[in-house]
Amino acid sequence: MAHTILTINAGSSSLKFALFAGNGERLHKGAFEIGALSHDDAMRELLAQITSLGLPAFTAAGHRVVHGGQHFTSPVRVNDDILTALEKLTPLAPLHQPHNLHPITALKKLMPNLPQVACFDTAFHATQSATTRRYALPRALEAEGVKRYGFHGLSYEYIAQKLAQLDPAAADRRVIVAHLGNGASLCAMRHGKSIDTTLGFSALDGLVMGTRCGTLDPEIVLYLQREKGMSIETIEDLLYRRSGLLGVSGISSDMRELQASEETSAKEAVELFVFRAVREMGALIASLGGLDDLVFTAGIGEHSATIRSQISKGIGWLGASIDEAANLRATTVINTEESAVNLWMIPTDEEAMIARHTAAVIA
């Protein structure tokens, strides 16, 4: 039986959804602003919208869940025990996990017999070695789950599959995917699997992001507490919501606005974004032992030709050479014929990945 699948990606400010036919065709997509509506109200509005548009009733739902912890390393059909276990992971992702789980609970009330599947952003990185995932902290903390998890896994998994379709030989090459958006990270892949990534224990690590700081000396947090008297809540707000491009520029977290601005602080924010992306890429190139392919994806990666060009030039020492005309046209292949590194621009599709996983789990 081919299922019609509803996919849900819920955050603190929005609930995005899409409806997929059994053949994988996207029938409809939309979003609701959370705050204007609760997650419960959003789910009721969603069901009403599907009915009013005459769309087919869905027979299963798939949800993006940011954190799977140490044990959920593949998509899973949700029952009461699974939901309880996922709720217990909230301390690992306090700003994301509750919002991911609210729609599952809301839909369970409205459609108690509907199969629901949780798809994890951490799962794709479970293939990394223990050494790659380990922090130099006491082992008791590692046993409790303090380790590198990595995120954006649904996006990376989609790109890995898409790249293999476009160029089957790429699966055996050394690949870095740059998921550059309001949240940003890099992933080093070999044989279509994650071997290293810039995000670690939380969604704060690695690259400069829209409002998040990226890699930070941990002493800074101690300094803010000790010398500035900041509370944990204030520091959390600073690092997650007032840093990154917004914090450096003092203008906006939106790359488009910053690139259009003549303000020095806006230019400095963009320069830092590129510098950190190139520097972190160097670490992943070391993990891979070289680089054959670089894929740009997500909001900035797909829509900013300037950022693609600057980052590609930053790895020019590897022999990477971008075709500026192709880059401006945003074609799939954006390297010159002479380039020693294949450069790609491939749009990601986390919703399609969730739909594929959901169909497989309930099959």
Image: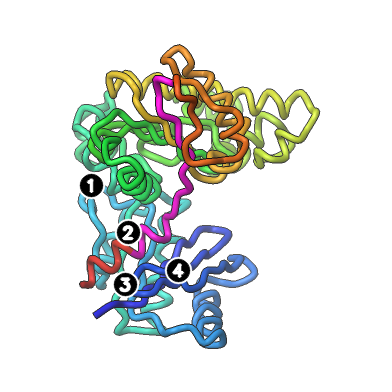
For badge 4, the amino acid type reads Arg
Cα distance between the residues tagged 1 and 3: 21 Å
Instruction: Point out the frontmost of discs 2 and 4.
Output: 4
For badge 2, the amino acid type reads Cys
Cα distance between the residues tagged 3 and 2: 10 Å
**Classed neighbour count for the residue bearing mark 3: other residues with Cα under 10 Å, few (<14), some (14–19), many (≥20):** many
- The residue where tag 1 is placed is 70
Give residue 132's quadrant in the image.
Answer: top left
**Classed neighbour count for the residue bearing mark 1: other residues with Cα under 10 Å, few (<14), some (14–19), many (≥20):** some
- The residue where tag 2 is placed is 119
- The residue where tag 3 is placed is 116
The mark that comes first in sequence, 1 or 2, is 1
Question: Can residue 256 be seen?
Answer: yes
Q: Quadrant of the C terminus?
A: bottom left
The mark that comes first in sequence, 2 or 4, is 4
Instruction: Point out the frontmost of discs 3 and 4.
Output: 4
The mark that comes first in sequence, 1 or 3, is 1
At mark 4, the secondary structure is: strand
- Whether 274 is drawn above or below 106: the answer is above
Q: Are marks 3 and 4 in contact (CB under 8 Å)?
A: no
Q: Nearer the viewer, residue 120 or 26?
A: 26
Instruction: Point out the frontmost of discs 1 and 4.
Output: 4
Q: Residue furthest front?
A: 337
Q: Which residue corresponds to the image point at 66% horizontal and 29% vertical from the top-left?
A: 248
Cα distance between the residues tagged 1 and 2: 14 Å
Cα distance between the residues tagged 2 and 4: 18 Å
Q: Which residues are magenta?
A: 339-355
- The residue where tag 4 is placed is 26
The mark that comes first in sequence, 1 or 4, is 4
